[in-house]
Amino acid sequence: MNSPVKLLLLFLNESDALSGRPLYEVIVERLRQLEIAGATATIGLIGFGHHQRLHHKGLFGIADDRPVTIVAVEEEAKLRAIVPEIRGMLREGLIVLVDAELLADMAANVADA
């Protein structure tokens, strides 16, 4: 089962919001509604973007606008279809589509048992 898939990588900031909600939450929930195979949002320890400003944990461990990465896995057509909507949600950030190869889907093994 070596099927081609794509990874959609979204880079944003923890403080990014839409309608008063964290943007990473809004995006992951939207990906789920669209039945994308899988998505995960992770908060980074430190990072920077084109402004060269470091985003990291601040003084006394209080969050100082940490970087967030969302990774979604799916067939290319489904991911490309959602990109315009996501682009409209992001004020700043980065959207990357990467080739990948699905080597194992352990959930499929459980469903087959």
Image (spheres, rainbow, N blue to C red):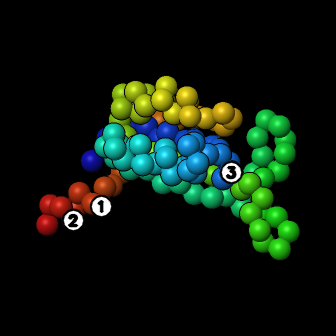
Res. 12 mark: none
C-alpha span from label 1 to label 2 = 7 Å
Element carrying mark 3: loop
Residues at circles 1 and 2 in contact by the CB criterion of under 8 Å: yes
> Residue 98 or 36: which is nearer the viewer?
36
* Disc 2, SS: helix
Between 6 and 64, the one lying in front of the other is 64
Q: Residue at image x 76%, y 40%?
A: 49
Cα–Cα span, label 3 and label 1: 34 Å
Image position of 79 (left or right of 44): left
Q: Which residue is mark 2?
A: 110
Q: Is residue 74 left or right of residue 67?
A: left
Which residue matches tag 1?
Answer: 106
Outermost residue toward the bottom?
60
Q: CA distance from mark 2 to mark 3?
A: 37 Å
Residue type, numbered disc 1: Met
- Mark 1: which secondary structure? helix
Which image quadrant is residue 74 in? top left
Viewer-closest of 58 and 70: 58
The C terminus sits in image quarter = bottom left
Residue type at mark 2? Val
Percent position (x, y) of residue 103?
36, 51
Name the mark on residue 15: 3
Residue at 46% over, 48% down: 28
Q: Amino acid under label 3?
A: Ser
Question: Residue 73, can we see it?
Answer: no
Asked if marks 3 and 1 touch (Cβ < 8 Å), the reply is no
